[in-house]
Image (tube, helix red, strand yellow):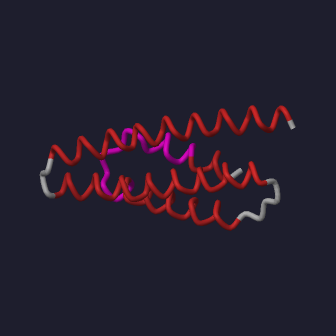
Amino acid sequence: MITQKIAEESANNRQTKDIKKVLQVADSFEETAQQMKQLKIEDQQLVEYQMGFAEIYQGNADTTRQFVSALNNQDISTAKLMQQQVQQLGKKEQELSNQMNIYCQEN
């Protein structure tokens, strides 16, 4: 499953200090967002979840790149803000995943 793959890659690299690996994870988030958008789903509710995950993954890609840029520019306040945004996206992803799981169990 697409979401499992990106979750594993993200978890495996969460503590890395290697900027190249961090940027690779950002690329993976962007690729996953594109893959998610291309899925052919007929159920309208699942399409909403699909687009929600795609938006979250693209947000993770963009925010991660901004975080790296802020670090490179020694802009600590922006880096902290980007870190908070990544955390918020993680919470949104968890909430969306929970909602989708409930929906799938009920249908």
| Residue 20 belongs to the span the image colors magenta | yes
Q: What x and y, as percent, mark residue 75?
A: 14, 50
Q: Which of the 4 image quadrants contains residue 32?
A: bottom right
Q: Residue at x 26, y 43 (%)?
A: 81
Q: What x and y, as percent, mark residue 52?
A: 59, 51
Q: Which of the 4 image quadrants contains residue 37?
A: bottom right
Q: Residue furthest left?
A: 74
Q: Is residue 46 above or below residue 14?
A: below
In the image, taking residue 47 as reference, residue 27 lies left or right, namely: left
Q: Which residues are magenta?
A: 7-21
Viewer-closest of 88 and 20:
88
In the image, taking residue 107 as reference, residue 70 lies left or right, namely: left
Q: What x and y, as percent, mark residue 9?
A: 53, 48
In the image, taking residue 73 as reference, residue 59 lies left or right, namely: right
Instruction: Considering the whole magenta stretch, tell me its main secondary structure.
Output: helix
Q: Residue at x 51, y 59 (%)?
A: 28
Q: What x and y, as percent, mark residue 25?
A: 45, 55
Q: Is residue 43 above or below residue 38?
A: above
In the image, taking residue 102 as reference, residue 37 lies left or right, namely: left
